Image: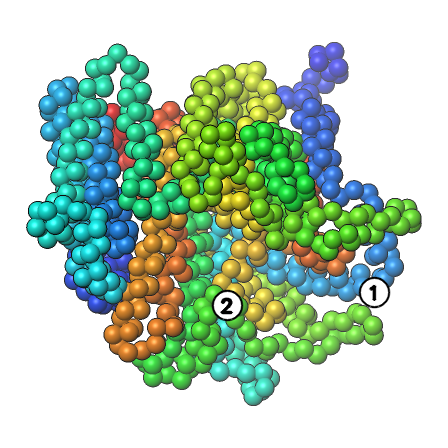
Amino acid sequence: MPNTKRYLITGGVGFAVGTFFLWNYPNLGLGSALLGGLVIAALCLLYSAPLADMIKAGLIAGMFGAVMTIVYGTHKPGVAIIAGMVSGLGAGLLAFQRSPQANPKKAAILGAEAGAIAGAWTGLSLFVMAFVIAPAAGIDAGDFAEHLSETVILADVLGLGSDILILLFAFAFSTLSGAILGAASCAARSLPLRPNIPLLAVIALPVLLIPLIDRAGNLLLLDALIPIYIFILLALGLNIVVGYAGLLDLGYAAFFAIGAYTTAMLSSPHLGINLSFWLVIWVAAAVAAIAGLTLGAPTLPLRGDYLAIVTLGFGEIVPILFRSLGGGPPGGTLTLRFFGMPIGIEQVDLTGGNKGINPISPPHLPLIGDFDPSNKIPWYYLLILIMGLAIFFINRLRDSRQGRAWMAMREDELAADAMGINVVRTKLLAFSMGAMFSGFGGAFYGAFIGAIFPSSFDFSVSIILLCMVILGGLGNMTGVIVGGLLIQGADKMFIPKGAELFRRIAETKARAEGSSTVGVSALQDLTQQRLLLFGIVLVVMMLVRPEGLLPNERRKAELHPDDDTINSNSVAAEAEADPSLAA
Amino acid sequence: MAASQTPSSPQAAPLVPREPFLTKRRAFSIVGLIIFLGFFAIPIYQTILLEMWDSPRQLTQQIVIGLTKGTYIAVIALGYTLVYGILELINFAHGDLFMIGAFLALIFISLFGLDPKTSSGITIFFSLIGILGLVMVCTALMNAGIERFAYRPLRNAPRLAPLISAIGMSFVLQNVGIFLGDGLIWDKLAAGLGSDAIGRVADAMGTQSVAPKNIPDLLPNGQVFFIPDSLKYTYKDLLVAVVSLGLLAGLYSFVRFTKLGKAIRATAQDRDAARLMGINADRTISVTFLIGGALGGAAGMIVGLYNGTALFSMGFTAGLLSFTAAVLGGIGNILGSALGGLLIGLILALSDQYIGTRWSNAVIFAILVLILLFRPTGLLGQEGGQKA
């Protein structure tokens, strides 16, 4: 029974989660048990192999809809509809990817089925949220109905209960969008285009439409999405170093910091230099690339983990430098001695020390004027533009001579050297190219946040980026993007929102018991369990899919044939046998 | 090439010609290094050296402090080096295990009701020895458990998978530290069980789970020797150094002279060959993690008592320093880690005094880069071919 281990792992985790909720939030009672059970059932189903593709696709996409609805729904019930739509789109796409149909009608039916499953999930979770979680969190049922009717005017017109209506809407939209996507994927296949272009169009559409939906529903999604995209941009850069060139870099945040600080110094009143953002972003990328060379040069002779520790050191040194090169008393002098002669060095406040640099000038465009921090839409599209260019560029780079040299070096440095690849140049280019993209990311980040602090570039940033790259699938850009969306989405959207929800539940409970609401223990405060959840996710993901979610096909093929046959552990072999990527 | 070979001894000619010292690659490295260290220009070195020269007593004091710190850094570094030696895995969770050690020590001390004011010296002495044993057993079991569930299933997975798993475990352990440090949880437990001892733990932890905890000052503070004005050396320092060195010596002789130690070394060298020789590799790896965990926990308790505080994030900084120490000495090499630990301790103390605390990490990593540039596998590391 090769699957037993997976069942045990998922079942164990599900059981632990369920018990935890029951113990901490008994007033969630039935709802939490139901939810836990659903999650366990879904996970088990996901891992049992011979399951119809549409069910699998629907389940995967439906999980997203459910989480989205439960976490965001208490504040904005209308989000369930959007979640249903998005998960329906995802389900349709996945279902088609898993079993491509030649007939558009069949494809549409398959997509609709998958979308319906996803929609059922979303609808069900809306139901759980409306009748179990919202009352438990002390959100008044009357309030809730008002919220709903604000979002859906049709509720009054049709005279239906608004919860039921939204549930139906979510379900219907999900089914519909699943069907549309299934048919569209099929139709796109028959077009005389390169096969990935229609796919890209399908993915690009929601990405481009998000700001409009966000504004219409007043969901404030962009506040969370922009930092997520920035991190994905950084992860794409890191993927060049770790995924393509195989150089383990534990200090990547340093380049991010360098990009951001370059922007901050050159386009803020802090040093009196106030250049345009459109110029500074290139300067920041160039400076970061040079920093990549500077890191690369002394580490050339190092291999494997020795390299890792030096990059880690670099990642530690750079924030220390930024922290220390400033923030002192203005006009102070530092006295050093040169062969006995005292020399005074006037201290210049370059970086603002711990206080960082604030404010940083925003970009300026003729029609829009200065980008406004409160209106996120231009920022969003600018970032999409940068990311699109980065993805295009990295994609071309990967297939170029240089990219193939990186991969050759990753597989065997000695052999690559023997084949005439200039290893020195290849390594240095990998470092500086990778750094360049984080320079862009840093420049955008600095301008977007409008202020930078040395504490936002510490080791944890490097680690999270590395996790995004490895979790998604080393060397595969789609994988890195998916991994980034998952990790950053959990970190910046779902866990904070969920924490807020759970805090309200704990407070409601405390109020009902008549005890004080001040001291909520760490067990009940989800913000304090962020690390725990994140850690568990990392470990379980690695146990279930050690190669990452979407492993690079070539790399997967390279990794597996020569596996040790002595060890009978079959996890890796199973992953290889999994036909999920055969499409 | 052929012309330079001596015709008299064709066998002596090496298959691969020895690299000249100044290869292109190394030249690049040196140029890079000069840029890298550009921030620490000559006047700074001069200033520091002159400052050291001005006050030899201060220098001696810092060296004493540095060596004391170095001994416990070395003990933590051993945990990294053992695991790396056998699995080639940077066990990120090790630093956090060290933190758990400090928390467990505080919990046991509160459970036993030890108090420097009321308990007698002998009670404290024997209880501390007992607590040290308990802490070591707990962390050893934890570490072996982590290996069993988070690393063993990934033996044959791509190289970076166990690394991410280790990072994940590190986060989990940090959160365990937050839970252990939450007085409200202990309060609930004390109320449920009606136990005073657990109530004492709750008091020791306080209400803020992420705040630093105070560990009672149980180690003797008397002076071993004392030179007026600056140099002092307390029994506390001595004790820390003696216990740490004892652990180091114990571990070294264990790995060197016992049968299990031999198995560990064999497994580290070649796991499959060791397995063919009848060594149970899985068990050997478990034993390695048991030992590593025990050392980490012991170090946590020692440091906790020495510094008097425990904080859930203390494992990260300590882990970083000691992993650097292990790399500096040549990772996988026990004596190397000991040496690396002492060196890092020294550098840390000296740079704290002469350059400034905020620069210390930067200085440590700069020196690490410098050393790795000339010895790419650390001070005592073997030139290990293509490994990793």
Viewer can see residue A561: no
Q: Quarter of the image holding residue A383? A: top left
The image quadrant where one finds the N terminus of chain A is top left
Residue type marked 2: Ala
In percent of width and height, residue B172 lies at: 41, 56
Across and down, in percent, residue B379 comes to: 67, 44
* B112 with respect to A119 (left or right): right
Residue A309: image quadrant is: top right
Q: Specify the quadrant that holds the C terminus of chain A.
A: top left
Q: Considering the numbered disc 2 on the image, is that residue within a helix, a strand or a loop? A: loop
Residue A69's x, y, as percent? 24, 49
The quadrant in which residue A391 appears is: top left
Image point (44%, 49%), residue name: B166
Which labelled disc corresponds to residue B57? 1
Between the C-alphas of marks 1 and 2, the distance is 36 Å
Q: Which residue is at a point 91% across and 49% down the rendered structure image?
A: A340
Numbered circles on residues, count: 2
In the depicted structure, whether residue B272 falls above or below residue B360: above
A139 vs B75, nearest the viewer = A139
For the residues carrying marks 1 and 2, which lies nearer the camera in this image?
Answer: 2
> Percent position (x, y) of residue A216?
29, 42
Residue visible at 67% across and 55% down? B358
- Name which residue type carries label 1: Arg
Relative side of A284 to A578, left or right:
right
**Of B110 and A205, the residue lying toward us:** A205
Q: Chain of mark 2?
A: B
Q: Residues within 10 Å of mark 2 (few under 14, many from 20)?
A: some
Residue that label 2 marks? B211
Using the image, name the chain to which the residue with label 1 belongs.
B
In this orientation, which residue lies closer to the viewer: B317 or A216?
A216
Name the residue at 42% across, 42% down: A375
Secondary structure at badge 1 equals helix
